[in-house]
Image (spheres, helix red, strand yellow):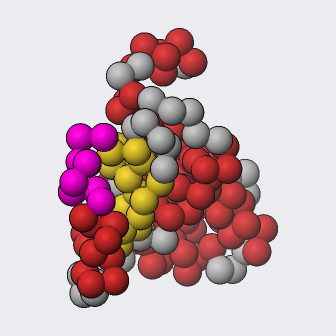
Amino acid sequence: MIKLTEEQISDIAQDLEAGLKCFIHKVTGEVKTLPDELNGNMEIDEELWQDVIDEIDNDEENFIVIEGMDSRESYILMEKFIDTVEDKQIAARLTNAINVPKPFHTFRYELDYSDEYLKKWYAFKSQQMIEWVKKHLLLNSGNENEEEEEM
């Protein structure tokens, strides 16, 4: 598999956060994106994306597919972030926020009260998404042993 640059990996992470599904060509490293229908993009205009869909369908075995985190994984990400929060009061509010109905909305609402932690959340989430992409690239490259060596 071709090596991607840190910039490409970061771009893929941003695309995933924006609700896109990414397809990386194993030989060329070219990245294709499509709206992720499971991520709220139910009414996509397939005509707009048909060229990309056809290209991926015609060479499916040569693409690695990376999808964004599901709700369970996103919830775990919020928990991990809370573990990094040094302000006990904010940590308690965030913990409460993820234990009520609509935890994602409530978590974000609580972060709106602290510019500092809102910025930290975005930085944390961005870094975690980059790690998510790297993990999936590694798992799909056939070099699973490399991940064990890095850890």
Dominant secondary structure of the magenta stretch? helix
For residue 19, above or below residue 149: below
User: Residue, x 51% and y 33% (percent of image)?
Assistant: 2
Horizontally, is 19 left or right of 47 in the view? Answer: right
Residue farthest right in this picture: 116
Residue 60 on the magenta segment: yes
Q: Is residue 5 above or below residue 144?
A: below
Quarter occupied by residue 49: bottom left
Nearer to the camera, 75 or 25: 25
Q: Is residue 71 visible?
A: no
Q: What count of labels does the image hold?
A: 0
Quarter containing the N terminus:
top left
Q: Residue at x 27, y 75 (%)?
A: 50
Q: Do we see residue 38 in this rendering?
A: yes
Q: Dividing the picture into quarters, in which one does residue 37 lie?
A: bottom left
Q: Height in image: 45 above or below 105?
A: below
- Residue stretch rendered in magenta on the structure: 55-62
Instruction: Locate residue 110, reporting x and y percent.
Output: 58, 76
Choose between 95 and 29: the one closer to the eye: 29
Relative horizontal placement of residue 130, taking residue 133 as reference (left or right):
right
Asked where in the image residue 145 lies, by quadrant, the reply is top left
In the rendered view, tell whether residue 64 sits above or below residue 52: above
Residue ID at (40%, 45%): 25
What residue do we see at 41% from left, 19% from top? 143
Residue 114 is situated, as x and y percent measured from the top left of the image, at: 73, 74
Would residue 79 be counted in the magenta stretch?
no
**Image quadrant for the C terminus?**
top right
The picture places residue 98, in percent across and down from the top left corner, at 43, 65
Residue 23 percent coordinates (x, y): 38, 53
